[in-house]
Image: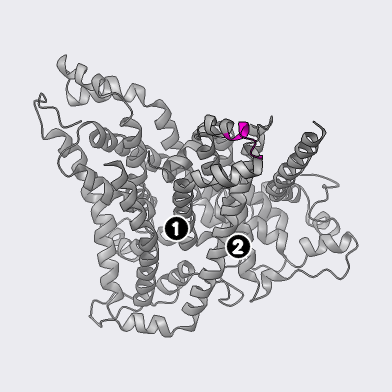
């Protein structure tokens, strides 16, 4: 609907949104630019606006810790995204089988999404701790030689983060897929059943392919969550042992706010922005174009 | 018929198995929080407390120490409330006004501005942390609750605007036109027609914002000072304090205290919470 001409004060709508839009655009794009400039400056403990070009990015690239963060991002990202997507889709399909207690089960699968990653991290840290946690439980059940020290093992700790992450987010994916499954036209499925197609075949050939748009939007949401993850790592391992479970987000936090390396922190934030933009911008573009 | 039953049994077995997997951490948190440390050491993760008590809850609430501060989670809980309530209210109000204009009073460029705003829903907030802490310093509200409220309001505007705009687009334009023929003004249409129809989306947005702001850790840890730390930061500091004896029971009680408000909202109004989740991902 175009702006109605009958309004006596046609400038009023624009005036109403102006303040919050100006503030938001300054917040989003102004601060992105400012952060970008900081990443090109010599800032260390305090912001210092002396221009040094791409020196901070060169330092970032040489930093062993950042390489650990990037390879953790790849491990955590693929396990978290793949795990949450697969489990979420499975749960959605199972729940779509006209289950009587569907409401209760859905509530159970989705509740982790209502709590903070810090709570999740605290809980899993207790369950996975090598002293009194899972290992202790298995010993009591008679498996004396059972060892589970992933949480304090530098090579394995990142998998603990992924497990807790999937636990928290799988229900979210399930909710998105379930909403989409409910939107599918029943008559197509009935027609296929009349033709004698089996249920797994109907899912594989008709239903899952028709979930494609939801699949992409879900993938987009879950991947940007993965890139932004900070809380879960902070609560579960605090980036440790050493910096074995650093992700770009925890690296940025450590550099900018505890190690006095503001320029390096700003540069790593820009790298994160680039990763998210690479996923989100094409998605937003196609999403908004379709509507026109 | 028989084959069908086997399928149903298998289906239920898998569904219940996953239900158990999702519930186990909650169960472990609850039983651990009801034990004392002797029972924690003697029992196992899954064992029921032999002598349940609320001592660790009391300690987590008002006596647990982080560093030299032994006031428990209580001050952090109050900070989170004082921060979340105004931030949720203001960001929701702004979102509904923006959504009203962007759906019913479109102007040239308004769609493009909406698209630019949408990026704010997804951007990694790490890019705003450093400049923002400098701005809060200039405004004189660094390390204070006011600074946190401001950041949460501004960071929330993209999502609240998205929610309301997508909802208001579904309201029939004829309604607005008819009101205008009757001589209703911009504000009268908003107050008398649009707002009374907004209850569902209002609930969705309030819940969404409350959950996000209550559960936020990033802004809380970066922008708060000694007296304005929110509950997530308090919990993290408490659980990561390296004392000689790790009191897991107190940690679990603290985690439950931090989770209770949003869990309560989820259980009471889960339908609206789910709608918010899906509305954020799938733009109608």
Boundaries of the magenta span:
A192-198
What residue is shown with label 2? Answer: A162
Q: Is residue A283 left or right of residue B265?
A: left
The chain identifier of the residue carrying mark 2 reads A
Query: Which SS class for mark 1?
Result: helix
Residue A7, x across and y down, in percent: 11, 25
Q: Is residue B237 left or right of residue A126?
A: left
Q: Residue at x 80, y 51 (%)?
A: B46
Q: Residue at x 42, y 43 (%)?
A: B282
Asked which quadrant contains residue B188, the reply is: top left
Q: Depth check: B47 or B4 in front? A: B4
Q: Residue at x 25, y 24 (%)?
A: B173
Q: Marks 2/1: CA distance?
A: 15 Å
Q: Is residue B151 left or right of residue B27?
A: left
Task: Work out whether A56 lies above or below B136.
Answer: below
Task: Work out whether A156 lies above or below B162.
Answer: below
Query: Which SS class for mark 2?
Result: helix
């Amino acid at each position: 609907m175009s702006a109605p001409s009958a309004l006596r004060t046609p400038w009023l709508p624009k005036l109403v949104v102006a303040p919050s839009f100006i503030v938001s655009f300054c917040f989003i794009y102004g601060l992105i630019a400012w952060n970008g400039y900081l990443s090109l400056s010599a800032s260390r403990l305090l912001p210092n606006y002396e221009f040094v070009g791409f020196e901070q990015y060169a330092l970032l690239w040489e930093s062993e810790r950042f390489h650990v963060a990037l390879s953790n991002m790849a491990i955590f990202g693929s396990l978290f995204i793949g795990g949450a997507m697969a489990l979420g889709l499975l749960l959605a399909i199972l729940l779509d089988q006209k289950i009587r207690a569907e409401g209760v089960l859905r509530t159970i699968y989705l509740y982790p999404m209502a709590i903070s990653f810090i709570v999740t991290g605290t809980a899993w840290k207790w369950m996975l701790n090598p002293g009194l946690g899972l290992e202790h439980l298995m010993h009591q059940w008679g498996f004396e030689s059972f060892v589970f020290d992933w949480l304090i093992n530098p090579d394995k700790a990142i998998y603990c983060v992924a497990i807790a992450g999937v636990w928290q987010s799988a229900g979210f994916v399930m909710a998105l897929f379930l909403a989409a499954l409910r939107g599918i036209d029943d008559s197509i499925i009935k027609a296929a059943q009349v033709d004698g197609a089996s249920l797994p075949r109907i899912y594989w050939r008709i239903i899952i392919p028709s979930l494609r748009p939801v699949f992409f939007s879900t993938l987009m949401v879950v991947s940007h969550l993965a890139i932004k993850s900070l809380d879960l790592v902070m609560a579960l391992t605090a980036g440790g042992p050493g910096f074995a479970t650093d992700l770009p987000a925890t690296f940025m936090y450590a550099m900018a706010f505890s190690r006095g390396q503001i320029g390096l922190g700003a540069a790593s934030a820009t790298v994160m922005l680039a990763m998210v933009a690479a996923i989100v911008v094409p998605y937003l573009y196609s999403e908004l174009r379709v509507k026109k | 018929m028989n084959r069908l039953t086997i399928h149903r049994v298998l289906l239920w077995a898998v569904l219940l198995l996953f239900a158990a997997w999702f519930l186990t951490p909650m169960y472990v948190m609850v039983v651990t929080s009801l034990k004392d440390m002797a029972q924690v050491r003697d029992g196992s993760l899954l064992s029921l407390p032999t002598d349940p008590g609320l001592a660790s809850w009391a300690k987590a609430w008002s006596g647990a120490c982080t560093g030299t501060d032994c006031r428990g989670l209580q001050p952090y809980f109050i900070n989170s409330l004082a921060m979340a309530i105004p931030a949720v209210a203001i960001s929701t109000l702004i979102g509904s006004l923006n959504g009203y204009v962007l759906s019913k009073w479109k102007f040239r460029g308004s769609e493009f501005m909406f698209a630019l705003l949408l990026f704010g829903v997804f951007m990694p907030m790490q890019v705003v942390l450093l400049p923002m802490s400098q701005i809060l310093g200039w405004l004189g509200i660094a390390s204070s609750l006011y600074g946190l409220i401001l950041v949460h309001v501004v960071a929330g505007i993209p999502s609240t605007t998205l929610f309301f705009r997508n909802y208001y687009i579904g309201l029939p334009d004829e309604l607005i036109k008819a009101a205008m023929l009757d001589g209703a003004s911009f504000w009268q249409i908003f107050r008398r027609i649009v707002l009374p129809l907004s209850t569902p989306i209002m609930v969705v947005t309030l819940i969404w914002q409350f959950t996000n702001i209550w559960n936020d850790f990033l802004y809380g840890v970066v922008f708060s000072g000694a007296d304005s730390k929110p509950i997530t930061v308090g919990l993290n500091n408490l659980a990561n304090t390296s004392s000689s004896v790790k009191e897991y029971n107190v940690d679990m009680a603290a985690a439950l205290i931090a989770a209770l408000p949003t869990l309560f909202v989820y259980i009471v109004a889960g339908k609206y919470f789910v709608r918010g989740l899906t509305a954020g991902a799938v733009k109608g």
